[in-house]
Amino acid sequence: MSKRTALTAITLAELLAMSLWFSATAILPDLMEFWTVPAGKAAWLTMSVQLGFVAGATFLAVFNVADRAEPRFVMAVGAIVGGAANLAIPWLEPSYGIAVGLRAITGVSLAAVYPVGMKIVASWAKEDRGLLIGILVGALTVGSASPHLINALGGIDDWRTVMYSVSALAIAAGVIAAVFGKMGPNTAPPSPFDWKQVRYAFALPSLRMANFGYLGHMWELYAMWTWIPLFLAMSFEETGLANPQRAASLTTFLVIGAGGFGSVAAGKLADRWGRTRTTILAMSISGSCSIVAGFLFGATPILLGALCIIWGITIVADSAQFSASVSELADPAYVGTHLTTQTAVGFLLTIASIQLVPIVANITGWKWAFAFLAIGPALGSIAMATLKRMPQAAHLAGGRG
């Protein structure tokens, strides 16, 4: 199987499977009405995915599944099980509590998709590691945005349309991964489980800085992705825009989906300019946008939408480079374990920032609701600047740092 075929298949599978993540967020107002729950409680339909992902990623890391099992089959099972769990919500129309549980199962399943997909891509990479992982994260980003597009194009009329559609996409992703997701030539042999590998993620200074940078990035990313649809809808409604919900869904797709371009562009830049510089630049811009966005609440939709698209491009542009950095700094035999550990800790942190946004919004209004997210990019930039000065930075991006 050629490199192009394998990478195209894994990228497509990642895009289709990750549509599951925000399938509930895209239709949150409808689900709030369906189960008669407030926004803070309804947010658990997304946060349960985060928790499930953490649980699944921890299991994969502890038992070294990503390094010991055939990765394409691990990814395929994850996508299919996740799609089935999500499918059960519109099909069975269960109670709110059961729906949250099904979303948690979806999160567990996605832990077998995202980190494992990165491992497969890394096995094909040489000097283009940053670009290839950037393309994968770009696919993840567009996939995460897709439920908002489905909603804007007709799902608003019935929330079940969105859930059925993304579930079918995820199941298709599993088939694609199983058939075409072959590992590349740069594959380390399977290794027995080693507890030290999980501990090394934060014990080794260079890996610790790369992971701290990732945590700063994650503090901002999923809180923004979760609440930007409601923020835009309420802002558009305040301006008197016709059909603000549909406009907000389409704009949200553009905002999140634009991150796909950011991921690929940053991947190219990082391979030539260095991972540390690229991540610092992206976090500096996205952190600034998190502060400015609130001041444009209620402003003309075009102005607010443009700012949020810039935010969407830069907020995820650095994501792949943290993963690429870990894959270059870690023991090659345990790259899968280290990537899974990184994502598990990062997604656990997102639960706190997702919870805080509506709390801050209730206290201060939307003007300051996102501003505190800038703390993450600021601290993440400090961590990556520290890594840049370390000798181990020579292992990043072919010596470019």
Image: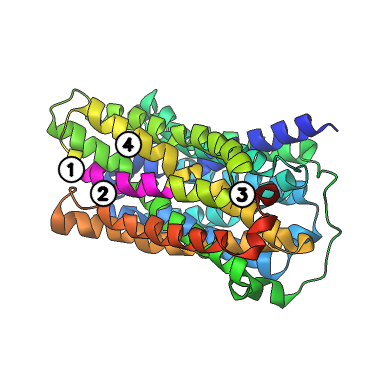
Mark 1 residue element? helix
91 or 214: which is nearer to us?
Answer: 214
Q: Earlier in the sequence, mark 4 or mark 3?
A: 3
Query: Element under label 2?
Result: helix
The residue type indicated by label 3 comes to: Tyr
Please identify the quarter of the rendering in which residue 326 is found.
Answer: bottom right
Q: Residue at x 61, y 66 (%)?
A: 206
For residue 341, side relative to residue 26 (left or right)? right
- Based on the picture, tell me whether residue 196 belongs to the magenta stretch: no
The span from disc 2 to disc 4 (Cα, nearest Å) is 11 Å
> Which amino acid, by three-letter code, is at mark 1?
Phe
Q: Is residue 226 above or below residue 150?
A: below
Where does label 4 land, which residue?
308
Residue 288 painted magenta: yes
The majority secondary structure of the magenta stretch comes to helix
How packed mark 2 is, by other alpha carbons closer than 10 Å (few <14, some 14-19, many 20 or more), is some
Task: Label 3, secondary structure: give it.
Answer: helix
* Image mark count: 4
Residue behind mark 2: 291
Give the residue pinned by disc 3. 114
Closer to the eye: label 3 or 2: 2
Label 1 to label 4: alpha-carbon separation: 12 Å
Left or right: where 123 falls relative to 165:
right
Q: Position of residue 200 (x, y in %)?
A: 65, 73
Magenta range: 283-294
Position of residue 183 relative to residue 379, above or below, is above
* Circle 1 crowding by C-alpha within 10 Å: few under 14, some 14–19, many from 20: some
Identify residue for label 1.
295
Residue that appears at 71% across and 51% down: 119
